[in-house]
Image: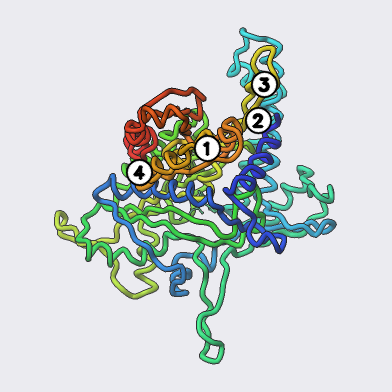
């Protein structure tokens, strides 16, 4: 099945099983804003806990905060967001649709990459076992010319963005015949810069209201609290401050479900270090964060680093951790070495000294910062894309059978255990409730007595529940149950007394944290 179709099915699945709903759906939704349902909120909370514990519990020099969404307007002037937090946008005059010029160009490059992949697949089929992919890519004329084209466009586009030469960005679009997918024409307006921050007003207009912004990143709440935390926590460099919270961006092109949203959540950590040591910490955090992703068990080949060639003016190194989504490799997390830019700017704009007294050097300086920044919603989508499976269970010569199963890492699954009485009588429901009442303090359990056991298993597979137990008449006699494993579908008879141990060993967050 085409990856695009799988993605459409995943979006429908998220809605059908209470993971993600369009916001204000009864009013036909609101562009790029989504709500999390009864299952979604549990998965989201588990992702946040996995991140928070890996940062704050596992690092004694990382502490957390929770800063306000509203901040003094000067914060965004100092950080550069008022002047420079913008995307280049372009409108198609025929369809009246608005696009991000950079996304149009990136999508065009992706299409060329798709053509290369097709050539590789064709050749691999033709040559079979003797096929050497690397040799083919470096010698095949068509592939070489595609790669050359990609390089020329990428270089010219990077230069145009660096020089803020938006006429040339438009020329790249027109010269490559990049058309509007709706109208199919290349009738484009000029490229203009569009600030992504949402603004509102604080105080009544009569009082002289102040324009304030909904924060576009949580990081600035950390920077402005650097001194508070350093002093009250008696923190010594190097140390980090972590935060999880909402961020808002008026994205021009909000697409691909919860990949790019206008209201989303970030998990960010700013690590303050001595100037000159930042590259060591940048490399260390790069690895630590990659380990965090790969501990989920979705396959190392599905992740890669994408080091930035074009750096923001305040950064001296930056990389993205990318995951192979159904629509290609895309950024999930950014790791940035932000120098002393942010703290120095706040020092200048606030007029307050924001420094660290280093007892070893006997001097004060503005610390450098290495940042790790990941979107909760994007991580959610990454996990759902990786976990969604359609399995054919048809046995040879048997009736057609299949299932949809969410192979979520057990520690992140919303429900850890479903408890199912075989029938609704003979004391089986009471026994099932007794089991839940004992386990519910430690594990999220679900009681399910409706429909056949087979249908109940399918329902639990579809929401990703790692274990189901069935209560039957034997249970009443010997206190044993049948436990079924979601992934293998194997069943075994175990004592009720063993359930806590099984769940603890296999679904506890600790099992994931030990791998980071
Ligand atoms: N403080 C640095 C910062 O905000 P960023 O690369 O703009 O860096 C970091 O964002 C992460 O936040 C991204 O890697 C992505 O996971 C998430 N993110 C950014 N914009 C988003 C959006 N519109 N919708 C969902 N997630 C987003």
**Neighbours of disc 4 within 10 Å: few (<14), some (14-19), many (20+):** few
Q: Looking at the picture, does residue 74 appear above or below residue 283?
A: below
Residue at the location (47% across, 30% down)? 472
* Rendering colour mode: rainbow
Q: Looking at the picture, does residue 270 appear above or below residue 439?
A: below
- Residue where numbered disc 4 is placed: 438
Which marked residue is nearer to the observer: mark 1 or mark 3? 1
- Residue where numbered disc 1 is placed: 464
- Residue where numbered disc 3 is placed: 120
Q: CA distance from mark 3 to mark 2?
A: 13 Å
Q: Is residue 273 visible?
A: no
Q: On the rendered structure, is 269 left or right of 24?
A: left
Badge 3 element: helix
Mark positioned earlier in the residue sequence (3 or 4): 3
**Neighbours of disc 1 within 10 Å: few (<14), some (14-19), many (20+):** many
Q: Looking at the picture, does residue 255 appear above or below residue 476?
A: below
Q: How many marks?
A: 4
Specify whether tag 4 is near ligand 1 (CB below 8 Å).
no
Residue at the location (51% across, 90% down)? 207
**Neighbours of disc 3 within 10 Å: few (<14), some (14-19), many (20+):** many
Q: On the rendered structure, is 181 left or right of 437?
A: right
498, 306: nearer the viewer: 498
Residue at the location (26% across, 61% down)? 365
Residue 291: x and y in percent read 39, 36
456, 479: nearer the viewer: 479
Q: CA distance from mark 4 to mark 1?
A: 22 Å
Q: CA distance from mark 1 to mark 3?
A: 35 Å
- Residue where numbered disc 2 is placed: 147
Badge 2 element: helix
């Amino acid at each position: 099945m085409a990856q695009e179709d799988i993605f459409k099915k995943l979006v429908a699945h998220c809605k059908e099983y209470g993971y993600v709903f369009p916001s204000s759906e009864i009013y036909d939704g609101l562009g790029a804003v989504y709500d999390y349902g009864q299952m979604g909120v549990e998965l989201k909370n588990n992702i946040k806990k996995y991140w928070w514990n890996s940062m704050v519990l596992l690092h004694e020099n990382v502490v957390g905060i929770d800063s306000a969404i509203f901040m003094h307007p000067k914060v965004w002037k100092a950080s550069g967001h008022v002047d420079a937090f913008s995307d280049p946008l372009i409108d198609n005059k025929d369809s009246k649709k608005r696009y991000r010029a950079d996304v149009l160009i990136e999508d065009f490059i992706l299409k060329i990459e798709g053509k290369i992949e097709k050539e590789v697949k064709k050749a691999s089929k033709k040559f079979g076992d003797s096929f050497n992919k690397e040799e083919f890519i470096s010698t095949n004329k068509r592939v070489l010319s595609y790669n050359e084209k990609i390089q020329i466009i990428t270089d010219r586009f990077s230069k145009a963005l660096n020089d803020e030469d938006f006429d040339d960005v438009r020329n790249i679009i027109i010269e490559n015949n990049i058309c509007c997918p709706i109208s199919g024409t290349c009738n484009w307006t000029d490229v203009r810069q569009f600030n992504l921050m949402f603004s509102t007003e604080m105080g009544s207009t009569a009082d002289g209201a102040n324009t304030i912004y909904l924060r576009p990143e949580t990081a600035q709440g950390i920077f402005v609290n650097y001194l508070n935390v350093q002093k009250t926590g008696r923190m010594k460099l190097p140390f980090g401050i972590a935060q999880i919270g909402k961020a808002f961006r008026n994205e021009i092109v909000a697409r691909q479900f919860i990949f790019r949203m206008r209201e989303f959540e970030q998990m960010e950590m700013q690590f303050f270090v001595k100037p000159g040591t930042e590259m060591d910490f940048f490399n260390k955090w790069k690895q630590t964060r990659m380990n965090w992703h790969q501990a989920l068990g979705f396959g190392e080949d599905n992740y890669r680093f994408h080091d930035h060639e074009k750096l923001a003016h305040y950064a001296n190194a930056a990389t993205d951790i990318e995951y192979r989504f159904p629509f290609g490799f895309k950024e999930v997390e950014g790791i940035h070495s932000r120098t002393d830019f942010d703290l120095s700017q706040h020092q200048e704009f606030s007029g307050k000294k924001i420094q660290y007294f280093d007892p070893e050097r006997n001097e004060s300086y503005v610390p450098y910062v290495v940042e790790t920044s990941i979107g909760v919603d994007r991580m959610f989508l990454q996990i759902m894309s990786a976990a969604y499976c359609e399995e054919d269970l048809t046995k040879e010569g048997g009736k057609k059978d299949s299932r949809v199963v969410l192979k979520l890492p057990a520690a992140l699954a919303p429900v850890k255990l479903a408890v199912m009485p075989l029938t609704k009588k003979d004391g089986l429901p009471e026994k099932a409730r007794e089991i839940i009442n004992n386990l519910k303090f430690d594990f999220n359990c679900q009681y399910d007595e409706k429909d056949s056991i087979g249908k109940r298993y399918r329902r639990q597979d579809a929401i990703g529940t790692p274990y189901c137990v069935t209560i039957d008449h034997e249970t009443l006699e010997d206190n044993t149950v049948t436990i079924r494993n979601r992934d293998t579908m194997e069943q075994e008879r175990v004592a009720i007394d063993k359930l806590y141990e099984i769940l603890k060993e296999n679904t506890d967050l600790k099992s994931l944290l030990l791998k980071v």
